[in-house]
Amino acid sequence: MDKAVYKISDNCEVKRLGDRTYEFTASTSGLDRDGEVILAEGWDLRNFKKNPIIAYAHDYRALPIGRAPRVWVSKDGELKNTVEFPPEGTYEFADIVERLVDTGYLKTESVGFIPKKWEDGDGEKAPKRKYTKQELLEISIVPVPSNPDALRNAVDNGIITTKEFETITKPEEEGDWIRIPIKECDVTATIDISKKEGIKALYCGKEKQVRTYMFDKRDPYNWTMARAKKWVEEHKGMDESKGVVEEVPDDKEPPREKRASQEGIKDQFDYVKSLIGEEGMNDETTQVAWEVTKEVMRLTGDDIPDDILDKVGAVLNQKNKDRLNQIKNLAQQVLDSVGKPEEEPEKEEVIEPEITREQIIDIIKGAVTDVIEKAQGKVT
């Protein structure tokens, strides 16, 4: 297993050490909320210490919000670290996070690591998994499900503005889940929206509405931020008062998928187009795209779509015309350098709409022959 794993610390103790510097507990050796254990003596911190940045909510595309001058395993079996935020005014988002940490509204860290060795258990008498050797990749300051209410209080108390609240509660990737908040309300439960698709939600019982949708990034669901945002956009009109979407019991075979409609196929193509526009394509993806294109051509009975042929033909014809004129002009310049020929009545130049390779060669041969014969005095 070389895929990164993310774990949130249940120890929420934060100590202020000095100006914009704090001490966190990043991980403990206790049983976590996933029923797993990370042994403190198994931490490999060497690579992390070479680049000890602190991120927010595992967002690797954003700038780091601070650095960890020190990281160590305590005698109590806890992975601890200090966080030093940059000087005020250096990075506005880091200033927001530092203010929330300093006032106690943010106090949770999550570790990203690569498991090297582990032992699996039954989840009852023994943890579901015990990590015995793991390499620390990064540490993030993260909000947890109960934090949005605390952050809302931070707005009410003037610690942050409404705009800053919206910035810090943006859609995020945390551990194995993508979280997309859609409303403000008091969360009372986590519900299943679709077990089959790997979608959960933080649900507000009093208001009977979803506060945050959660999408599982693991196999076989493999949700991405782009797909999750698209799903939320498409389900804006869903009746959230019903709570859990009806599910097929685990002991029954799920119904077979219906055949995709033409509208469904079109939606998939539109979605793929949006992904290409957002992410681009590498060589492997481009090859797959060409295979799909050829299959579409085969199904429609065309080797190449007519509109593409027309455009290519127009471009080639224009190129041929331009090249023909260039060749004729070049030949005329060569003839002029030997001696000015007798003036002949101007004739309207007729350019064929297409020119073949053989025609180009004949024109060149003719021009060269005229030059040689004139140089030898065979023609005047």
Image (cartoon, rainbow, N blue to C red):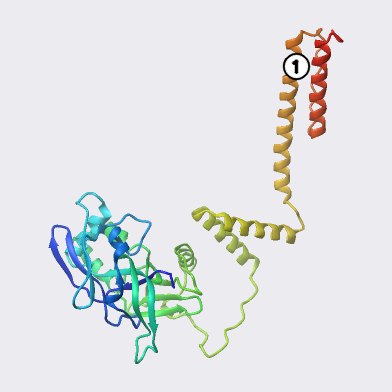
Instruction: Determine if residue 72 is in view.
Output: yes
Q: Position of residue 20 (x, y in %)?
A: 17, 58
Quadrant of residue 335 within the rendered picture: top right
Q: Nearer the viewer, residue 306 or 79?
A: 79
Q: Nearer the viewer, residue 178 or 205?
A: 178
Quadrant of residue 84 within the rendered picture: bottom left
What amino acid is at disc 1? Gln
Vertical side of 205 occupied by 113: above or below? above
Q: Going by the image, does 322 lie left or right of 251?
A: right
What is the secondary structure assignment of the residue under circle 1? helix
- The structure residue drawn at horizontal position 21% and vertical position 63%, both measured from the top left corner, is 70
| Quadrant in which the C terminus appears | top right
- The structure residue drawn at horizontal position 34% and vertical position 83%, both measured from the top left corner, is 35
**Residue occupied by mark 1:** 332
Task: Report the residue that reaches farthest toward the right.
Answer: 378
Vertical side of 279 occupied by 248: above or below? below
Q: Position of residue 305 (x, y in %)?
A: 72, 51
| Quadrant in which the N terminus appears | bottom left
Q: Going by the image, does 135 lie left or right of 11?
A: right
Vertical side of 80 occupied by 124: above or below? below
